């Protein structure tokens, strides 16, 4: 029985990267709707975390359902629970930039997930 989970944009297209546009110091981007979809044939338990290469210029902020993702390592991954075959778990991503940011930041945050 295959296990498969995909990360999608709100319209259902596969999501490979986030585009938050310009985010000024001391602000956060508009939320970007995202979703996990179980495309396999069995339920899967999803765990997520965010790896920020540096947070001085900003950080990725995520929530799925009632869970705000706070884990920064795989060892501390946030458990999103079991997703049934064909089911979708909706969430939001935004980018938060601190007031003291010193310039334009390239993508340095990565959403990582595992399932089993």
Image (cartoon, rainbow, N blue to C red):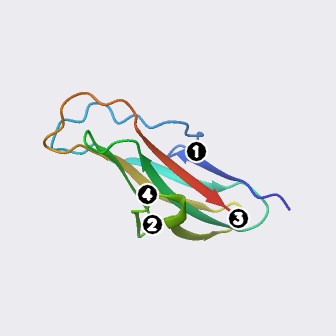
Q: Which residue is mark 2?
A: 65
Question: Considering only vertical position in the picture, is 83 above or below 112?
Answer: below
Q: Position of residue 105 (x, y in %)?
A: 30, 31
User: What is the crowding at mark 2: few (fewer than 14 residues within 10 Å), some, or many (at least 20)?
Assistant: few
CB contact under 8 Å: marks 3 and 2: no
Q: Mark 4 highlights which residue?
A: 72
Q: At x 70% / y 64%, what residue is drawn?
A: 116
Specify which label sits upstream in the sequence, 2 or 1: 1
Please state the horizontal and vertical placement of residue 80, each as a whole percent of the image.
Answer: 53, 68
**Marks 1 and 4 in Cβ contact (< 8 Å):** no
Rendered image: mark on residue 12: 1
Q: Earlier in the sequence, mark 4 or mark 3?
A: 4
- Marks 4/3: CA–CA distance: 19 Å
In the image, 73 versus 98, the foreground residue is 73
Q: CA distance from mark 2 to mark 1?
A: 17 Å
Location of residue 69 by image quarter = bottom left
Residue in view at x 40 percent, y 34 percent = 107
The residue that label 3 is drawn on is: 116
Count numbered badges in the picture: 4
Q: Position of residue 24 (x, y in %)?
A: 19, 35
Residue farthest right in this picture = 1
C-alpha span from label 1 to label 4: 27 Å
CA–CA distance in space, label 4 to label 2: 19 Å
Residue 98 pos. (x, y %): 19, 45
| Disc 1 element | loop
Q: Earlier in the sequence, mark 3 or mark 2?
A: 2
In the rendered structure, the answer to whether residue 111 lies left or right of residue 30 reads right
Residue at coordinates 18% horizontally, 32% vertically from top-left?
102
Quadrant of res 109: top left
């Amino acid at each position: 029985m295959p296990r498969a989970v995909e990360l999608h944009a709100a319209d259902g297209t596969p999501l490979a990267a986030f585009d938050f546009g310009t985010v000024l110091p001391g602000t956060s981007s508009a939320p970007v709707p995202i979703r996990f979809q179980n495309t396999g044939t069995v339920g899967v338990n999803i765990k997520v975390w965010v790896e920020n290469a540096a947070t001085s210029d900003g950080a990725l902020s995520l929530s799925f359902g009632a869970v705000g993702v706070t884990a920064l390592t795989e060892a501390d991954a946030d458990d999103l629970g079991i997703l049934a075959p064909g089911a979708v778990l909706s969430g939001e991503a935004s980018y938060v930039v601190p007031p003291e940011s010193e310039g334009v930041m390239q993508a340095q945050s990565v959403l990582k997930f595992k399932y089993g």
